[in-house]
Amino acid sequence: MPGFWQTFCCCRCAGVLIEMLQRDFHASMTAGSSELHGRLLEDYKLEEMLRSPHRFIRPEPSAAQRPVLEWRHRVQYAVSHAINHFYSMDLDVRKEIPIQYVLEKWWPRKTDGFDSVLHYWDVKHKMIDELSLAIAANDDLKRPVILFEQWKTEVPSLQMALSIIFQAAWQPEGWDKLLIQKYMVVHDANVVEAFQHMVNVFCWEAFGRLPGMIEIYCLMEGRKIRYIPGRQSLQRSMDYIRLIRDSMPEAEKQVSEHFTAKDKIRVHEEVDRWRSEGAKHQKTWLM
């Protein structure tokens, strides 16, 4: 998400599982960082490319010509800061402070980028309602083990690295795996699919196991998508990430940290071809 990829050091690791996961993660980074010189795939860049392919058909404007951020970007910024601040508080304090008061601190003061003043207020009320419901649904979760942190790991088999901003990761009581959560302002099927595959591969490579569950909150739609990785999930996710990797420019050919317009178009073409040629999707989606 633009403007929000800094690491928030609010991780409070609890339990043997998290200590083990962190040890395995740091060991894999130490062993692989000096050996692999592949490409880096960052989740927020891939998300923007998948959401707005039409923007990349034309050359990117210069810094002086860049358009005003869309309302989605501004709202995502506010939502992300609010979630981070809320779950950084002690459990007893969280029970006393409504999320709307936290959201207000970062909510856009002006209607720039929104369709109208009415749209501005409709979106704000919708965010308050949906975040309140999401937090109520998570009432049994005490403290996230990862909270808005940017993590990176190597994927030796693909000769590349993955970087993901984990918004919230939990270890529910009785679980030996992680529950990964993402809060999206606007649903996008391509982004949901890409995030699921990136998380599967990342967790396997960094922690040695798949996540127990991935939950994605699509706030404007009032929708929660749950994904439970199965036996075929890792191979399918590896295939997806390999496809994206092969559509990325070589590191030595990149003139900047951004994909070129041609590269972004090619990613979309390859994803469409992969879907059309692939077998039946074997996903476990719970809506």
Image: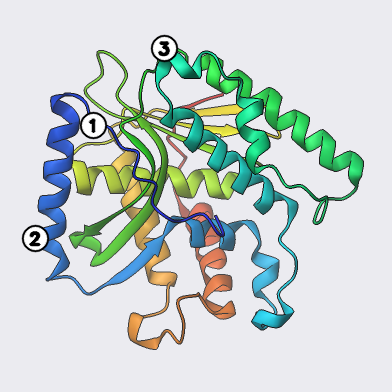
Q: How far apart are marks 1 and 3 (CA)?
A: 17 Å
Q: x%, y% of residue 193?
A: 49, 45
User: Which residue does the image show at 69% across and 32% down from the upper left?
Assistant: 127
In the image, residue 250 above or below residue 40: below
Residue that numbered label 2 is attached to = 31
Q: Quadrant of the C terminus?
A: top right
User: Which residue does the image show at 48% across and 37% down from the upper left?
Assistant: 84
Question: Which badge, 3 or 2, is on the more N-terminal residue?
Answer: 2
In which image quadrant can residue 98 be found? top right
| Coloration mode | rainbow
Question: Which badge, 2 or 1, is on the more N-terminal residue?
Answer: 1
Q: Nearer the viewer, residue 65 or 32?
A: 65
Mark 3 residue element:
loop
Badge number at residue 140: 3
Mark 2 residue element:
helix
Residue that numbered label 1 is attached to = 13
Q: x%, y% of residue 252?
A: 34, 86
Q: Distance between the residues labelled 2 and 1?
A: 23 Å
